[in-house]
């Protein structure tokens, strides 16, 4: 079978442009998604909405994708990655502009919906590139580099763009995120010229057969729990830790972002290690175990007088290293249970589960925060993580 994509054409293995496109795609998604958590209080005050309503800014970015991801994946299988990638960046830019100019809370939500649909297109494009262009023995490393883009984007959003909010307003921070997406779009257009644009699944009857894989559905359950636990923490920890641990907002944002920022070196590392040992499931199970332990410890450490900051630094860093085990190894499984020509559909299902979890987690945490204590809210992270651990144990992949 002729390989559907090489970077550049004629090469036997992908080169650095493929890695850079993978990283920049998830980086752009991460910046546009995560620009709002440190700004939620400002949005709540400007539009006079509750914390639970403010969390919709995150939810609507992702919720439509639960229904759209599989059709998007089939679209990529039929029309190729470059064409769909262009459409993805266009939607992200239009959505970012609408969000920046929003004069009401409903208008703000519309901008986030458009941004999120574009982001979903882009992520599935990038994952399809991995399945089609990378051999099995290099797939974990490639996905680790891809996965590092989200925490890098989160770090920029939490620690650079969020700093613009107090002085220049939350709209300036969103505009900055949109400019980052524009830069990633230019990079994609320049480097994606080396990608074949022939549809990857045109010769395969019914590419939706990928969805009949039981392992994909087990992975989907695992993924939904995992991302719910991660996004519940990163969305609300920046504001919750301010009062709970008696620390300034900038420090709370830094500590929360550390959960993902530390994955920048560790996700490629764990992905490469999993390639070398030829196993995925043990890393996924270990990731949930580490994250569960950390989530139980965080509320206790945050209450230590005088020691909260160093304690949180160590615990959240350890949780982040656990996340880094999960990202590349879970992402590798769809490419290993379906044919490359059906990778779009497989990753559409994976990303739909991811988005469902990402949308659910912040709302669950916010409900606990509105109707209980900060400790109760952090315990919801532990419950979600335990559910993910049980689901991970059902996986049959090695």
Image: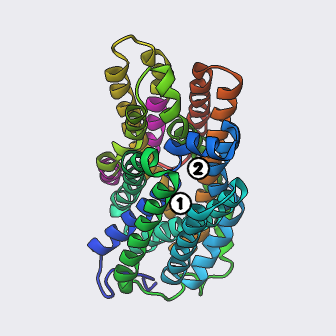
Q: To which residue does mark 2 refer?
A: 219
311 left or right of 243 in image: left
The spot of residue 330 in percent (x, y) is 49, 51
For residue 64, which quarter of the picture?
Answer: bottom right
Instruction: Please tell me whether mark 1 sits on a helix, a strand or a loop.
Output: helix
Does residue 295 sit above or below 69 in this rendering?
Answer: above
Does residue 377 sit above or below 56 in this rendering?
Answer: above
Disc 2: CA contacts within 10 A as few (<14), some (14-19) or many (>=20)? many
Which residue is located at x 69 percent, y 66 percent? Answer: 68
Q: Is residue 289 magenta?
A: yes
Q: Nearer the viewer, residue 259 or 221?
A: 259
Whether the residues at callouts 1 and 2 have beta carbons within 8 Å, the answer is yes
Q: Nearer the viewer, residue 335 or 246?
A: 246
Which residue is located at x 32 percent, y 49 percent? Answer: 264
Q: Give the dominant element type of the magenta stretch: helix, strand or loop.
A: helix
Q: To which residue does mark 1 refer?
A: 334
For residue 90, which quarter of the picture?
Answer: bottom right
């Amino acid at each position: 079978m002729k390989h559907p994509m090489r970077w550049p054409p004629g090469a036997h293995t992908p080169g650095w442009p493929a890695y850079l496109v993978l990283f920049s795609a998830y980086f752009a998604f991460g910046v546009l998604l995560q620009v709002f958590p440190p700004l939620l209080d400002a949005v709540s005050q400007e539009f006079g909405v509750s914390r639970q309503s403010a969390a919709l800014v995150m939810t609507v970015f992702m919720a439509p994708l639960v229904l759209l991801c599989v059709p998007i994946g089939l679209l990529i299988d039929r029309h190729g990655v470059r064409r769909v990638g262009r459409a993805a960046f266009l939607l992200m830019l239009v959505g970012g502009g609408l969000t920046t100019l929003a004069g009401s809370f409903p208008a703000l939500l519309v901008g986030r919906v458009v941004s999120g649909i574009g982001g979903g297109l882009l992520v599935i494009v990038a994952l399809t590139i991995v399945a089609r262009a990378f051999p099995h023995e290099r797939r974990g490393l490639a996905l680790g580099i891809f996965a590092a883009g989200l925490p890098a984007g989160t770090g920029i959003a939490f620690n650079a763009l969020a700093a613009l909010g107090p002085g220049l307003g939350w709209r300036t921070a969103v505009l900055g995120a949109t400019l980052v997406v524009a830069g990633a779009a230019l990079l994609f257009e320049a480097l994606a010229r080396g990608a074949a644009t022939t549809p990857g699944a045109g010769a395969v009857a019914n590419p939706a057969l990928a969805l009949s894989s039981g392992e994909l559905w087990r992975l989907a359950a695992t993924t939904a729990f995992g991302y719910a636990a991660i996004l519940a923490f990163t969305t609300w920890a920046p504001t919750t830790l301010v009062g709970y641990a008696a620390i300034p907002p900038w420090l709370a944002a830094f500590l929360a972002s550390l959960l993902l920022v530390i994955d920048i070196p560790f996700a490629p590392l764990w992905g490469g290690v999993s390639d070398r040992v030829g196993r995925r499931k043990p890393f996924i199970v270990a990731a949930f175990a580490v994250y569960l332990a950390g989530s139980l410890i965080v509320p206790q450490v945050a209450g230590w007088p005088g020691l909260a900051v160093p304690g949180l630094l160590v615990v959240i860093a350890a949780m982040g290293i656990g996340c880094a085990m999960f990202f590349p190894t879970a992402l590798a499984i769809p490419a290993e249970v379906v044919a490359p020509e059906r990778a779009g559909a497989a990753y559409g299902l994976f990303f739909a589960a991811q988005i469902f979890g990402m949308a659910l987690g912040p709302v669950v945490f916010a409900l606990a925060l509105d109707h209980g204590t900060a400790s109760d809210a952090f315990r919801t992270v532990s419950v979600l993580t335990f559910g993910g651990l049980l689901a991970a144990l059902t996986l049959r992949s090695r």
